[in-house]
């Protein structure tokens, strides 16, 4: 399983985690990476789907402790997660479906390469004017 945290402004993946099970640690590790990398100075909205891991006490405590505001839409409001769903669809189409991994570690390394080297640095996004998330973010500083 893969959890990813996206900064919606530049479509940059700022945190991710891979684990063999869909447990709360999966999403907490991804969010922890995002917080460590971005060090938010003000309240940040964190939107998620309705998975049980996003309603856990650990998730809510982590959010409160790190000045994060959890947000979860009602059932049937799939548009709120459209950008994240698009990322996962791109990952599957552009990388995962084309490969067979011999080990979990090889899969993790390939997903890391996709996120860090390709998706964030290279992949062009029409929403960002045809530039990569990192180029868009650099241009806006």
Image (cartoon, rainbow, N blue to C red):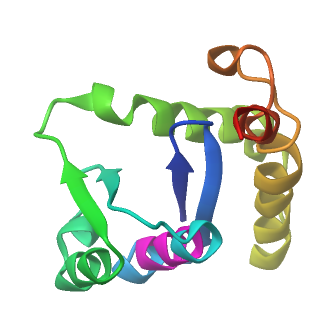
Answer whether residue 44 is visible to the viewer in this image: yes
Main SS type for the magenta part?
helix
Q: Quadrant of the C terminus?
A: top right
Q: Nearer the viewer, residue 26 or 35?
A: 35
Is 48 colored magenta in this rendering? no
Q: Is residue 100 visible?
A: no
What span is in magenta? 27-34
Image coordinates of residue 140 in percent, x first then y, are 70, 34
Horizontal side of 112 relative to 60 (left or right) equals right
Residue at the spot x=64%, y=70% of the render?
37
Q: Pick the residue in front: 25 or 40.
A: 40
Q: What percent of the width, then of the height, locates residue 68?
A: 31, 66
Residue 63 against residue 93 in the figure, above or below: below
- Location of the N terminus by quadrant is bottom right
Q: How far from the left and from the top, in percent, is residue 33?
A: 59, 74
Give residue 60's position: percent from left, percent from top: 21, 76
């Amino acid at each position: 399983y893969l959890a990813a945290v996206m900064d919606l402004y530049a479509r940059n993946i700022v945190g991710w985690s891979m684990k063999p099970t869909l447990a709360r640690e999966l999403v907490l590790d991804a969010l922890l990476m995002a917080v460590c990398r971005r060090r938010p100075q003000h309240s940040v909205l964190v939107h998620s789907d309705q998975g049980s891991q996003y309603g856990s006490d650990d998730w809510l405590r982590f959010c409160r402790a790190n000045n994060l505001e959890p947000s979860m839409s009602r059932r049937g409001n799939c548009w709120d997660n459209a950008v994240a769903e698009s990322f996962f669809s791109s990952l599957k189409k552009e990388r995962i479906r084309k490969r067979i991994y011999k080990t979990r570690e090889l899969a993790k390394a390939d997903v890391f390469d996709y996120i860090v080297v390709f998706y964030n640095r290279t992949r062009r996004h029409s929403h960002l004017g045809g530039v990569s998330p990192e180029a868009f973010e650099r241009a806006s500083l």
